[in-house]
Image (cartoon, coloured by chain):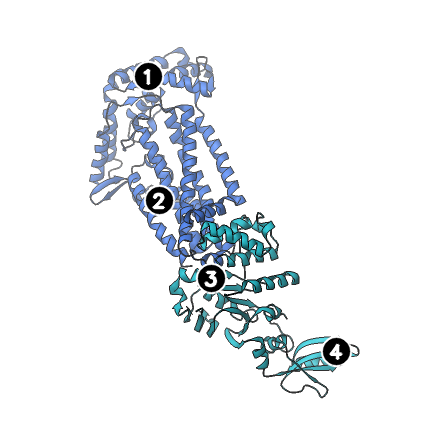
Chain colours: A cyan, B blue
Amino acid sequence: MMELKISDLRKEFKDIAAVRNVSYTMSTGVYGLLGVNGAGKTTLMRMLCTLIRPTGGSITWNGRDIFEMDGDYRKLLGYLPQEFGYYPDFTVYDYLMYTASIKGLRPVTARQRTKLLLKQVGMEKAADKKMKKLSGGMKRRVGIAQAMLGNPQILILDEPTAGLDPKERIRFRNLISELSENRLVLLSTHIVSDIAYIANEILLMQDGEIRAAGTAQELIDAMPQQVWSVEAVKEEAASYMKAYKVSNVKAIPGGVSLRVISSEKPAGHAVLETATLEDLFLYYFGEKENDDKDVEV
Amino acid sequence: MTIRMLKYELKKVFLKTGSRIAMALLLILMGITCFFAMDVSYVDGEGNSQRGPAAVAQLRAAQKAWSGYLDEEKIRKVIAENLRIRNTPEALSQNIKEMNIAYGWQQGIEGIRDLLNCSYAEGFREHDYYRADSLTEDAASDFYINRTRLLREWLEDEAEDQFSEAEKAYLIRQYENLETPFYYDYMAGWQQLFEFSPTIIMLTMLILGYLVAGIFSNEFTWKCEAVFFSSVYGRNKAVVSKIKAGFWIVTGIYFMSFLFYSGIVLLHLGTDGWNLPVQASWTSWKCFYNITNLQKYFLIGMGGYVGCLFISFLSMLISAKTKSTVTAVMVPVILIFMPSFIANIDSPAANKIIGLLPDQLLQIKMALGFFNLYSIGGRVIGEVSVIMILYGVLTAALVPVLYQVYRRL
């Protein structure tokens, strides 16, 4: 049995509620936690990693409170934080060997796992490089390697693709996919395409709450509004964007083509389209014009 | 597992460029201090000042000629020899070269002559460099008696209100317990070693403070704390390995530094006089601790070690609590330099408090000369014993506090 159960979880920082009454149960598979910056994803993940204690509610692993399990729970855990820090003067190999030691791996196992993971993340040749000399993408790969050192049953990855170029992002996504077998992977991101490909279940988080959860198809099917394609002259585009959530604007000869999310037909000539995950995310997190929230599709 | 963690904790500290610079700086400063500590001069028969190993050998030979028990007969001889030298045309001359020649003859008895100046001083806190020149051989019998007499007079007069009756009795008893006549010998090695010991220990402490200040806070500076605390041993063994790293850094570097310094100085100047009472040197004539030079050496070494451990652990605690390396680095600086700003207060009560500050451990050589006494449970104890025990206990108490503070972050 593998069950990570979150019940009525709350976390308040002074007067600010970062996580509000979240309840959810996860088992094997990849869970994508999607939300804009400030939605409470990192706070939720830090509680799942026992880094901060909740104000209320509980988190249990197979029925046992994770804070009471203490080291026994952390033994099952691999964590890549959003801001992945490192010891600047350590080589990649030293960094992983040290992390293996604090994860309780025996020296022989630590050496084996380090070599295997360095190969898996494509860092074999950079093993003797100092951490401070690595590129952003390489650091992230070391980050995922350290998270995997203890062969964890629970892998928590907080914004693992943040700051990576498109090529690195794809590479990283594939890597996570490879590593997700037989474990619980919780992956937070504000980049839709990251989880569109690899997540079995998606949790949409907003203002500290899980707004919706399910498979991509379930979420799309449950979307209360529809997606329309509207062709308009350039001058009309602004009024559409003001009145509706617009997921895409494309220039076409003689005007623009808009992808509008609306429960009613926005114009007589509007054509009903099949909704995608990107439309869904825009429906939940996007705003009409002057959106200052941080969603990347 | 713990040893591996410890190894990497030490690596974290010593791989930093700043740490390497600090270590190099310590080596340079130690070299300079050793140079000054070894710098003993000898004035030859021509009145020329010599330095280096040859000068040490000649000074040793000159003083060895006067070694032996400082009994009445020896004192008598020293008084007579001093007077003889003082009355030579060279000593009476106004020519510096001639005066130097006279000083050259005096080098063999110089140490005993300094003791005469102390013993026959007008008052307990007086010092007249030329007092020995006005003595006659008849005064020799009072050499040891004067020491206790001057103390008694001081306690009854100037220092009457500074000590309780029990403390006064303790001081007199300590003075009377000094075994006399004591032996006198060449001991420049120990004198020079003691003289510069506070410099070496304080320099080492400042470097140690820099090295250990980041052990806990750097996890946050480097943003490594999330992985650290979410690991299996992140809240227990890994924290212990940090404390151990601090302990071994302090222990290793302190003893390396102190033993290197002692070794160089004693190798150059010799270990002669190791078993002499500290009172055989005029700088410790008034000392109420009846110990030998070797015992004083151990006290200085161990006091410095306890002091460095305490200050370093306090710095580590501040580092763990504030997550700031800069704040933690300031701890040793404040603890070493702050007392010197308040040390000039002429109040026995204030002196008792200042005497308990941890910087005293770094300068046991000075603390041994202070008349700071504490009455604990009806027993009178000297400052050195009190601070050694006090900070030994406090250092031990800091360990679990440090552990709890960091693991709960």
Looking at the rendering, in which quadrant would you find the C terminus of chain B?
bottom left
> How many neighbours does mark 3 have within 10 angstroms: few (below 14), some (14-19), or many (20 or more)?
many
Chain bearing mark 3? A
Q: What's the residue type where badge 4 is placed?
A: Val
Mark in the foreground, 1 or 3:
3
Q: CA distance from mark 4 to mark 1?
A: 110 Å
Label pair 4/1, CB-CB below 8 angstroms: no
Q: What's the residue type where badge 3 is placed?
A: Leu
Marks 1, 3 in one chain: no
B328 lies above or below A10: above
Q: Which residue is mark 1?
A: B66
Q: Which residue is mark 2?
A: B357
Q: What's the residue type where badge 1 is placed?
A: Trp
Secondary structure beneath disc 3?
strand
Residue B118, position as x, y percentages in the image: 31, 26
Q: Residue furthest right?
A: A254
Label pair 2/4, CB-CB below 8 angstroms: no
Q: Residue furthest bottom?
A: A268
Q: Which mark is residue B133?
A: none
Q: Is residue A172 left or right of residue B305?
A: right
Secondary structure beneath disc 1?
loop
Label pair 1/3, CB-CB below 8 angstroms: no
Q: Residue at x 60, y 63 (%)?
A: A174
Marks 4, 1 in one chain: no
Q: Which residue is mark 4?
A: A256
Query: B155 or B3: nearer the eye?
Result: B3
Residue B16, position as x, y percentages in the image: 52, 45
Q: What's the residue type where badge 2 is placed?
A: Leu
- Say which label, 1 or 2, has the lower sequence index: 1
